[in-house]
Amino acid sequence: MGRILINVCLKLKIKLFLVLTIFYFPRDLSLNISPNTNPNYEEILLFCSNTNPYIASSEYGNEDIRGFGPYGPHNLFDKNPSTCWTEGSNNKGINEYVFCGLPENSQKLHFRNGNCKSQSEFRKSNRCREISVQIYIAAHILGNEIEAFCVYEGIKYETKIFAVKDTKDIQIFDLNIDWSKLIQNKNSLLSNYIKLYELIDPSEAMALFLVKIQITDIYSDTGTIGTSISDIWFSK
């Protein structure tokens, strides 16, 4: 009965979030939803995906986060410089972010700054001068989802800061992750999560690694449509 009530509450919270986002916040898709009842975890709402769950804090020119807008965060993962994510906030991109999955044993972040479709597009939008890369371990109860969204509960593991060059070239940042320790922490979190929600079948829960890439400083020329990032991916 306790587990059923938890599932119902989570789904009601997501429905409320979707209503408020769609009708009251058409441009800024910030995920400041109601506090989690468990103070040990940060609640993270992501698009469900078997390969790479993700979401961005805002998106330029898209009034419905359930759709794929021309500047959506899905563009970050195609390794195509002609597409990009452009944030849609009113603060020139400072503190805007994207969450995505972090493949196990990754040690390098590949990063293409700005809108690289053309030189004029590159100069028209702002670019990152500095980014914060925050590594999370997150757990999810299978079935705690509604429409395209899944609810994860995460714990921040560590944060790294990188200076970014103002160029369209791919930049590679060393993450220097101690994966043996990180995997141990994931297994411990998953075990505690299963006990916390009194799951009879441990396979009802899963844990994975996430990364939150946050814009902490920008370059600015004309900056007419916000700050853009063309591509991110990870390698060993």
Image (cartoon, helix red, strand yellow):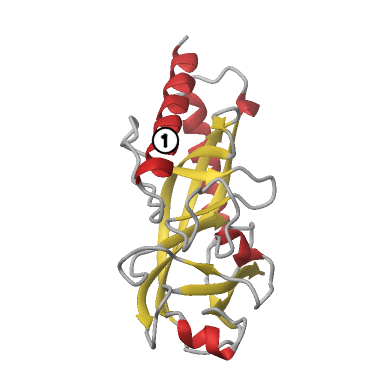
The image position of residue 187, as x and y in percent, is 55, 41
- Label 1 crowd bin: few (<14), some (14–19), many (20+), radius 10 Å: few
Residue tagged 1? 19
Location of residue 227 in the rendering, given as x and y in whole percent from the top left corner: 43, 74
Q: Residue at x 41, y 51 (%)?
A: 26
In the image, residue 121 sits, relative to residue 213, either above or below, namely below
Which residue does the image show at 55% across and 38% down from the upper left?
A: 150
Name the secondary structure under disc 1: helix
Quadrant hosting residue 108: bottom right
Q: Is residue 209 visible?
A: yes
Q: Residue 156: percent from the left, percent from the top?
A: 41, 52
> Of 185 and 232, which appears nearest the observer?
232
Of the 4 image quadrants, the one containing the C terminus is bottom right
Q: Could you tell whether 14 is left or right of 199 in the image?
A: left
- The residue lying furthest to the top in this view is 1
Q: Amino acid at mark 1?
A: Val
Instruction: Say whether residue 181 is visible.
Output: no
Which residue is at 47% across, 89% downward? 166
